[in-house]
Image: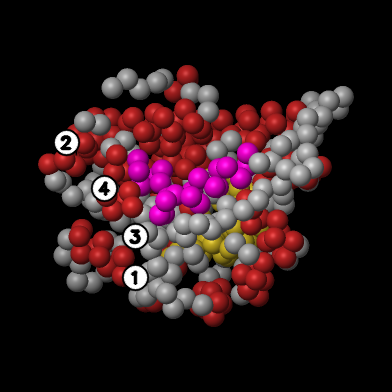
Amino acid sequence: MSIAKIDTIGSIEDLRRVAEKRLPKIFYDYADSGAGTESTYKANEAAFAQIKLRQKVGVNVEARKLSTQILGAESKLPVVLSPVGLLGMQHGDGEILAAQAAEEFGVPFTLSTMSICSIEEVKAKVKNPFWFQLYVMRDREFLARLLDRAEKAGCPTLVLTMDLPVMGVRPKDVNNGLAVPPRFSVCTAANLLRHYGWWRSIVETSRRSFGNLKGEIKNISDPRSLAAWTAEQFDPTVTWETVKQIRDKWKGKLIVKGIMNADDAAQAVNAGADGILVSNHGGRQLDGTIASLAALPEVVKAVGDKTEVYLDGGVRTGVDILRAKALGAKAVFVGRAYTYGLGAYGKDGVTKALSILQTELDNALALCGKTDVNELNTSVFYDGTYPTA
């Protein structure tokens, strides 16, 4: 199987194609799929294409600024690497490699609760603090220990995911028999072994299960019982009172993820959120809801300057970042874009993904006649091209 050299890669789509070749189907599908019929997953990308940009000439755009402040800290781009579960199954030690790439590039990285590399393992391999994402589990003692571990690791920001009271219906994961570590049926083993580059990266590390859960959960005898425990832990009883309790315990910044309307945005502000992440979980939860980008203007209008608003879902180009910024997002969270890079080329692929987004954003900013990404507004759009549901 021929894999393109990284210096021939010019787009996130190029990275996606390489990742599809390099990864076993079970893990490629995990990263690149949605809930149900995948209508919302597809809508996230399609919404960006509805916005047409107004090209502007005759403006001095020689000096351009792409950096921004995110929760008071400087970021080279208005970009945060999203929490993505099982990164260590896209490439061996995937969370560590992604965190290192983000640190070197100069943007925040968010570690998922459901990571392969633990909080402590990532901490040992980076110099600067990273963010941590939290699912609210039924086991509140375990949740409290996770928060303590994140605090001890120096994580400055907690991203609290609210849109997973129950697991979304994800047919591809069911069809593939997704498990961590993989279940070795004859068909699965044959598919895994055909992907030598991926296989080598996995066997060269000892990290092949949910790192944040190891040693924390009682009565777990094998990976299958661990998976069953995890599935049972997502908590349908979570309310805004739960958020307030977490806010009271967590000393750092708090971002509430999964907000898709003005009412929930107001509740997040009242609960003490420092930031709101407009997100439909990448189309992996409620199939049939609107694109995240379509929900962004309503949330921005409702919140005003009470808290920072970010966008997650469907960002594949630097032009998409410009569109989201013009609609009022302080920054965007990117998940699949850098996950493709990780699956394709490891750490270098994550850096490549960020470089591609940087180049595209810088180019679009200039061609729209603008010099500062923080001063963008809807004047860069043609009338009537706002995203719709």
For image coordinates 47% across by 76% down, the residue present is 238
From this viewpoint, is residue 308 visible? no
Residue type at tag 1 = Gln
| Residue, disc 4 | 176
Q: Secondary structure at mark 2?
A: helix
Q: Earlier in the sequence, mark 3 or mark 1?
A: 3
Instruction: Say which quarter of the image contains residue 275.
Output: bottom right
Task: Please state which of residues 209 and 13 is positioned toward the viewer in this rendering.
Answer: 13
Instruction: Please tell me whether residue 185 belongs to the stretch shown in magenta.
Output: no
Q: Earlier in the sequence, mark 1 or mark 2?
A: 2
Crowd class of label 4 (few under 14; some 14 to 19; many from 20; radius 10 Å): some
Residue type at tag 2 = Ala
- The span from disc 3 to disc 2 (Cα, nearest Å) is 29 Å
Q: Residue 212, which numbered label? A: 3
Q: Secondary structure at mark 3?
A: loop
Q: Are marks 2 and 4 in contact (CB under 8 Å)?
A: no
For image coordinates 61% across by 45% down, the residue present is 47
- The span from disc 3 to disc 4 (Cα, nearest Å) is 24 Å
Q: What x and y, as percent, mark residue 198?
A: 28, 34
Task: Please state which of residues 136 and 235 is positioned toward the viewer in this rendering.
Answer: 235
Crowd class of label 2 (few under 14; some 14 to 19; many from 20; radius 10 Å): few
| Up/down of 359 relative to 137, above or below | above
